[in-house]
Image: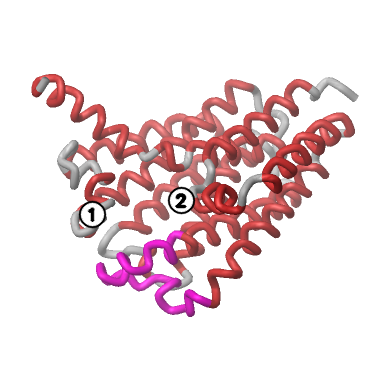
Amino acid sequence: MNQLATRTRPFLGTLRLSRVEEFYGNTIALVALGTLFNPRLSAADIALLFMGNLLLTIFAFAINDVEDAEDDSKDAQKVVRNPICARLLTQGQALVLSWLSVLVGLALLWPFGGRVLLLGTVNVALGFLYSYKRVRLKAMPFIDLVSHGLFLGTLQFLTVAYARAPELPRSAALGAVFICTISMAGDLWNEIRDFEVDRKTGIRNTASVLDVRRIEPMLPHLFVWPSVGVASLVLLNLSGTQRLVVGLAVAVLSLVFVLLPSGRKKRMVTDQAQWLAALAGLMLLVICRVTSTVP
């Protein structure tokens, strides 16, 4: 039993370091949205862009665990989640795995040209500087929100929207603004959730300089209205048949959401409901592909 545990420890540590369960749905949804504004992409292109973006996002989360290992060791919950604190990986192993995900991720974006590769590189730089202790963008009020909005949402969307495209449609640029706003709101929500832990570890972020009690009731609006904007852009960029099918699907999902108990709704929003984001993204991809030949 001890030998089995020893052998599986690096594998379990790698899985936990990736934290892919925290963002896989968002990545699927962002790639699906990007393809909506860039219909020239093939199925193979979409698969490469998804894997490339997923790996770059894995880096952002993994390097955060590497840099925060010392702080996480002081928190009862995070000491179990962080694979370095849990002694599943050494800090050196985690660092190598983090940068390996960057190399493979950028290699997957390489076929789409310099512009997409540049966006991926900026994504990596922001993800690194967000957590790197000598800079730590996440400890700079307001800059923390903007950087989070860019490297966890906006840049993933733009790499897909720009891939093999001569230029970025204006509607896609507006969509990027909405996506950035949603990501910033998500970061602020996380900062409010982690307020006490961050205060003990000396992180001075946006939540620490604002009146948390006043801004928390506003957060649902920062999610809802940009989400309505994204949904509107989706419908405007679809053909007649696609618009009808997607509109019906959105109506059904919205009705189901409205009928859910309030506690379940809050958990879905605060836990970011990755399965729901993945379902929505896959539905959008399938509907657009299946109905693309229907006038």
Residue drawn at (58%, 21%) of the image? 44
Residue 249: quadrant of the picture? top right
Identify which residue, 112 or 132, lies in the foreground.
Answer: 132
Residue drawn at (49%, 45%) of the image? 118
The residue to which callout 2 is attached is 122
Q: Residues within 10 Å of mark 2 (few under 14, many from 20)?
A: some
Residue 206 counted in the magenta span: yes
Amino acid type, callout 2? Val
Which marked residue is nearer to the observer: mark 2 or mark 1? 1
| Whether residue 114 is visible | no
Q: In the displayed structure, does residue 228 sit left or right of residue 18?
A: right
Identify which residue, 197 or 25, lies in the foreground.
Answer: 197
Report the magenta stretch's main SS. Answer: helix
Q: Secondary structure at mark 1?
A: loop
Q: How far across and down, in percent of the image, does residue 139 sit?
A: 36, 68
Q: Which disc, if any, is residue 185?
A: none
Q: Which disc, if any, is residue 76?
A: 1
Residue drawn at (42%, 62%) of the image? 193
What's the magenta region? Answer: 190-213
Identify which residue, 238 or 159, lies in the foreground.
Answer: 238
Amino acid type, callout 1? Ala
Residue drawn at (83%, 36%) of the image? 243
Q: In the displayed structure, does residue 76 sit left or right of residue 55?
A: left
- Which quarter of the figure is the N terminus placed in? top left
Q: Secondary structure at mark 2?
A: helix
Q: In the displayed structure, does residue 170 sit left or right of residue 272?
A: right
Sequence-first tag of 2 and 1: 1
Q: Residues within 10 Å of mark 1 (few under 14, many from 20)?
A: few
Q: How far across and down, in percent of the image, does residue 78 sit?
A: 27, 51
